[in-house]
Amino acid sequence: MVVKVLFFGVLKDLTGLSEEMVEIAPATTLGGLLDRYAERFETLKAARPSILLARNREFSNPDTPLTDQDEIAFLPPVSGGSTPSDMMGEKAGFVSFVEDESGSLFALTRQPIESQAWGRALQRGEDGAVIVFEGIVRNNTKGRPTRYLEYECYEPMALDGLARIGREIAAERAIGRIALIHRLGRLEIGETSVAVIVTAAHRKPAFEAALEGIDRLKREVPIWKKEFFEDGAVWVEGEWDDKLPGRAKTS
C-alpha cells in the first residue's frame, strides 16, 4: 500500500519534509507509521507527545488502521448594510471559504482582513449587537523585537475546523451570524491575523460567542505561526485541546 504523508509547522523543520509518498505494510496503523518516522528522524521523538494525527482530513487515534492512498497528516501544536452575497467580490481574495445558508462565513485568506466591513455585511435588522474581535501582529514577544510573522495551515482540515466551531457555537448560543476568518502567509506588525465576528440581538451572547470562537480556534484548528526576529525564527507552539482525538502516544 502507498499513503501520502504531510508535515506542517515545526515538523517540516525537524524532518526536512513537507510531504512524501511512502509504502506501508497492510497492517500498519497511524501510530505505527509515526513510530516509523520517529525511528528515521531522532528529532521527532521528543515532539511525539504534542503531535496530533489525522487520516483523510479527520483527527484519528493512533490505533486507526491505514488503507491504500490514505492522506496522513502529522500536526504539531497549533499557535497559538450589505449582505454577504453583495460582497462576493471580496471573497475573490479568499484562499477558500464556506458560507452557510444562514449567512455565517468561514474563510482562509492571504489578503488583509476587512473586519469592520464584514461586520456590516453580516449585520441584519434584528441585530442589536455586532462584536468584532481582531488578533493583531504585535511588535515583540516578551520584549524580543518581532520583525514579522508567517502563518501556514492544513487548508482543507483548517477550513472544516473553522466551520465546525462556528456551527456549533451558532447552534448553542442565541446569536444571528458568525464569521471566522484567518490570514495566511506573511503578516507585518499591526496587521490582522484573525477575525471573529458575531451578530446577535443582545450583547451578552455575542461577546460570549466571540470569546469561545477565538479560544477554540487557537486550540482546535491546524494553523501554525512562525515568528521572525533579527537573530532567527521560531515556530510558536500552543496547545491542542485535550478533547481532540488523534494524540500520538509516547513509545
Image (spheres, rainbow, N blue to C red):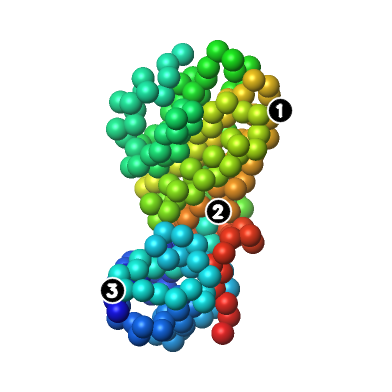
Q: CA distance from mark 1 to mark 2?
A: 24 Å
* Disc 2 to disc 3, C-alpha distance: 26 Å
On the image, the x and y values in percent for residue 24 come to 34, 82
Which of the two labelled residues, at mark 1 and mark 3, occupies the earlier sequence position?
3
> Residue at 63% across / 17% down in the picture?
128
Please report the residue visible at 59 percent of the width from the left and 18 percent of the height from the top. 127
Residue type highlighted by circle 3: Met
Which amino acid, by three-letter code, is at mark 2?
Answer: Glu
* Relative to 1, 235 lies left or right: right
Quarter of the C terminus within the rendering:
bottom right
Left or right: residue 61 versus residue 18 is: right
Depth check, front residue: 79 or 48: 48
Is disc 1 in contact with disc 2, using a CB cutoff of under 8 Å?
no
- The N terminus appears in which quarter of the rendering? bottom left
Asked which secondary structure carries label 1, the reply is: helix
Residue 138, can we see it?
Answer: no
Residue under the point 51% across and 80% down: 45
Question: What amino acid type is highlighted by mark number 1?
Answer: Lys
Circle 1 residue? 204
In this picture, is 248 found above or below 54? below
Q: Secondary structure at mark 3?
A: strand
- Residue 233: where, in percent of width, then height? 45, 60
What residue did someone put label 3 on?
A: 21
Marks 1 and 3, how far apart at CA: 49 Å
Q: Which residue is mark 2?
A: 220
Residue at disc 2, secondary structure: helix
Report x, y in % for residue 178. 54, 32
Q: Which mark is residue 93?
A: none
Q: Are dots 1 and 3 in contact, CB under 8 Å?
A: no
Residue 92 can be seen, yes or no: yes
**158 in relation to 11, above or below:** above
Which of the two discs, 2 and 3, labels the residue nearer the N terminus? 3
